[in-house]
Image (cartoon, helix red, strand yellow):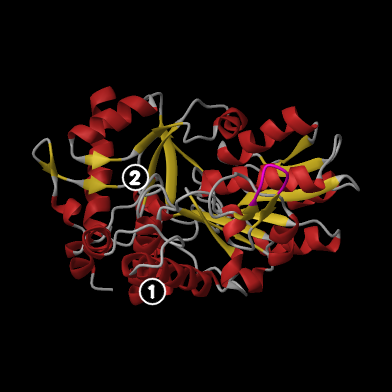
């Protein structure tokens, strides 16, 4: 990987903050966008702006073709069997809400169970809690061990004849733990239970083949994979999506409408009500093409090296606690040092031009499990460098010295 060439594709990385060069280590929250993605968006609005799937005129037809080509790009990227198994949404959160609503409406009744984990993002908790209120389902939670790994032995004990679905994240946005989703899927399928994978924190780091994994649903967000905000993907096996009712009503998701009866469209359009965000869909495909041009294996090797180096340097600092010490991690370090509040650490690092995340990271139940209120989180991307890690470590040491 030619890091300098890669960094030249991201103009924002040359920004200065308070007179210091920007060190952007908040990639778990959102990634920066390469020029090709932003230029693609500009080009769409200037040359191809027309509503898709609606018109017979040239612009509409051309925009439709580009949007469906984007669907094919995503299909190949995750190796879905059919492009109709790729549903465009606003992001991972909407994808989870869609499945929670439609799956539970079709397949769950009062007393049925959904299994999630103790490390889930709020989106994969609250969406199911809403269904607890509406349908009387019950949530069960897979515990974690002291390293921040799922206790698969305990998960097996949670499965009963009332278990309808298991929904877990692939990579923890707090701990960095890469969960054993292959094993989880195998166990679940041995009980005829489908599995939903939240891939928001893995899709930009790890190659994903949904057919090889045999997952039933998978979701990710465009803005975490160097694409635009406000667009994401839900993958679902065709037979599940066929049986699930629509999530929203409106244009495009219908075949015919009368005041007596409405019939719904075929996949994928049944779940894409209204005018889609087709410019961002097209730009998302551009982001995927950009990633493919570099190669996820090369990106992972680079990010793993940064993670290893940063962890080793942080551990040299007295009174540091790193949360998530699994041997199978991905691009995230969450930590606290002595009694320095995470917010204070983040604010002071910001004055040095270093952007990190502080707080509970939309994972308050996990924070309660860890016995803390929040952490400082540094998360890495393909454009980060060893020199930036050195600046980050020096910044952390300066903050520690201020509180000594």
Magenta part of the chain? 257-261
- Structural distance between the alpha carbons of marks 1 and 2: 22 Å
Q: In this view of the protein, can residue 10 be seen by the observer?
A: yes
Identify the image quadrant of the N terminus. bottom left
Q: Position of residue 214 (x, y in %)?
A: 69, 68
Instruction: Identify the residue under disc 1.
Output: 292
Q: Is residue 175 left or right of residue 135?
A: left
Q: Is residue 40 left or right of residue 136?
A: left
Instruction: Identify the residue under disc 2.
Output: 26
Prevailing secondary structure class for the magenta stretch in the rendered image = loop
Q: Residue at x 18, y 46 (%)?
A: 22
Foreground residue, 320 or 203? 203
Pair 1/2: label in front:
1
Q: Position of residue 362 (x, y in %)?
A: 50, 34
Question: Which secondary structure lies at badge 2?
Answer: loop
Q: Residue at x 65, y 68 (%)?
A: 213
Relative to 259, say whether 219 is above or below.
below
Residue lying furthest front in this view? 259
Identify the image quadrant of the C terminus. top left
Q: Residue at x 55, y 30 (%)?
A: 364
Please tell me how crowded label 2 is: few (under 14), some (14-19), or many (20+) other residues with Cα within 10 Å: many
Foreground residue, 51 or 232? 51
Foreground residue, 309 or 213? 213
Question: Which secondary structure lies at badge 1?
Answer: helix
User: Is residue 342 rendered magenta in the image?
Assistant: no
Q: Position of residue 85 (x, y in %)?
A: 61, 66
Relative to 302, say whether 167 is above or below.
above
């Amino acid at each position: 990987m030619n890091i300098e060439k890669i960094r030249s594709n991201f103009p924002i990385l040359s920004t200065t903050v308070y007179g210091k060069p920007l060190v952007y280590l908040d990639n778990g929250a959102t990634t920066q966008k390469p020029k090709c993605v932003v230029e693609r968006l500009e080009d769409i609005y200037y040359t191809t702006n027309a509503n898709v799937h609606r018109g017979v005129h040239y612009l509409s037809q051309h925009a439709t073709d580009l949007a469906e080509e984007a669907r094919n790009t995503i299909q190949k990227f995750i190796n879905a069997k059919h492009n109709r198994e790729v549903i465009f949404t606003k992001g991972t959160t909407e994808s989870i809400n869609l499945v929670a609503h439609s799956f539970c409406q079709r397949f769950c009744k009062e007393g049925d169970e959904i299994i999630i984990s103790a490390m889930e993002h709020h989106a994969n908790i609250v969406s199911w809690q809403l269904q607890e209120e509406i349908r009387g389902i019950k949530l069960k939670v897979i515990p974690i061990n002291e390293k921040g790994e799922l206790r698969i032995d305990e998960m097996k004990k949670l499965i009963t004849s009332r278990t309808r679905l298991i929904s877990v994240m692939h990579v923890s946005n707090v701990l960095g733990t890469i969960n054993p989703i292959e094993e989880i899927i195998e166990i679940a399928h041995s009980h005829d239970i489908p599995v939903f994978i939240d891939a928001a924190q893995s899709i930009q780091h790890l190659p994903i083949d949904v057919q090889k994994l045999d997952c039933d649903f998978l979701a990710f967000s465009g803005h975490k994979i160097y694409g635009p905000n406000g667009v994401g993907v839900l993958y679902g096996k065709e037979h599940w999506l066929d049986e699930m009712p629509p999530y929203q009503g409106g244009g495009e998701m219908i075949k015919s409408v009368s005041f007596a009866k409405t019939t719904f469209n075929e996949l994928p359009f049944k779940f894409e009500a209204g005018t889609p965000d087709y410019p961002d869909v097209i730009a998302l495909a551009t982001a995927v093409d950009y990633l493919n041009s570099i190669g996820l294996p090369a990106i992972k090797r680079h990010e793993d090296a940064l993670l290893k180096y940063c962890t080793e340097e942080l551990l040299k600092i007295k009174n540091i606690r790193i949360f998530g010490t699994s041997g199978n991690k991905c691009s995230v370090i969450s930590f606290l040092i002595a009694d320095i509040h995470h917010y204070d650490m983040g604010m002071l690092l910001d004055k040095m031009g270093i952007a990190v995340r502080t707080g509970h990271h939309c994972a308050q139940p996990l924070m309660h499990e860890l016995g803390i209120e929040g952490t400082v989180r540094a998360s890495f991307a393909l454009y980060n460098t060893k020199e930036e890690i050195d600046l980050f470590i020096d910044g952390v040491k300066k903050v520690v010295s201020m509180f000594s």
